[in-house]
Image (cartoon, rainbow, N blue to C red):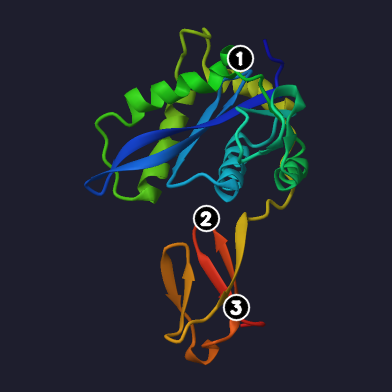
Amino acid sequence: DFEPGQETQFDTSPHKVRMAGQLRPVQTASAVLCYSRMLFFQFYPTFQRFDCKVFLTEALKYFRGATATVMIDNTSVVVLRGTGADMIPVPEMAAFGERYGFEFHAHRIGHANRSGRVERPFHFIEKNFLAGREFADWNDLNRQARTWCDRVNGTYKKHIRAIPRELFAVECPHLKPLPIWVPEVYRLHHRIVDVEGYVAVQTNRYSVPVDWIGRQVEVRETKDRIEIQHGLR
C-alpha cells in the first residue's frame, strides 16, 4: 500500500512499432503514480541519461508534481553502483532528482512484485495501444501516446476498483510542486566545423556559416532542436 505522493515507479521496455511503413524497434518509458495509478508513457529510439531526463521532465509536467521517491529497476542509466537499498545514483541523476524534490530508489533484484505497477502497463501498452496502429513519425507516436494516457487515466480499473484520475485528485495536493521555471533538458557537444561547413551530431550533419569552417563550436541538443553557437552567434 502507498500513501498519496509517496512513490512513482519508472521503467523501460523494448517494443516494435510500425512507423512510416516500417517496423522499428523503440524503447518504451513508463511512469506510474503508485497511489492513484496515473500512467504516462512515451517512446524513444534509444534510452540514455539524456532521454531519461527528457522523459522524467515530461512525466513530472504531466503529473504536475513529483512524489518523494522514484523507484527504478537498477538501470545503469541511473545507477552508479550497488543494487536495491544499497544503490547509489549517478551524481548527474541525483542532482536532477534534487531539482524536483525526489530521490531515486532501486528495488531489490528479483523482487518482481515491487515493480508490479509499472510492469503491468507494458503488457497493456503492447496489446492495446500499439496493436494494429501505424504512426507517421516520432511526434505522431508520442502525441497519440499522451492522448491515450488521458483516456485510460479517466477509465474505471477493475483491479483497483477506481478511476485513476479521481484518485489523482486526492494525490495531487501531496505531490511536490514543480519549480516556477522548469529548465529544458539538453545535451552539450563540442565540434570542429568540417571543410564543407557542416557539424556532425549523432548521425546527422548540420550546415553552418562558411566563415565558421575549421572553428570549434558548441552544440546544444534538446528534445526538439539543435542549436549551434560560435561565440555569441
Vertical relation: 138 (above or below) 108? below
Q: Residue furthest front?
A: 81
The residue that appears at 42% across and 43% down in the rendered structure is 142
Looking at numbered disc 2 in the image, what kind of residue is underneath it? Lys
Q: Camera-side residue: 225 or 25? A: 25
Q: Are marks 2 and 1 in contact (CB under 8 Å)?
A: no
Find residue 70 and report its horizontal and vertical position in percent: 67, 30
Under circle 2, the secondary element is loop
Q: Amino acid at mark 1?
A: His
For label 3, the residue is 217
Residue 194 in percent (x, y) is at 48, 82
Residue depicted at 51% across the width and 88% down the height: 213
Residue holding disc 2: 223
Q: Secondary structure at mark 3?
A: strand
Q: Earlier in the sequence, mark 2 or mark 1?
A: 1
Q: Which mark is residue 111?
A: 1
Relative to 170, is 225 above or below?
A: below
Q: Which mark is nearer the camera, 2 or 1?
A: 1
Instruction: Give x and y (percent) for residue 174.
Output: 74, 26
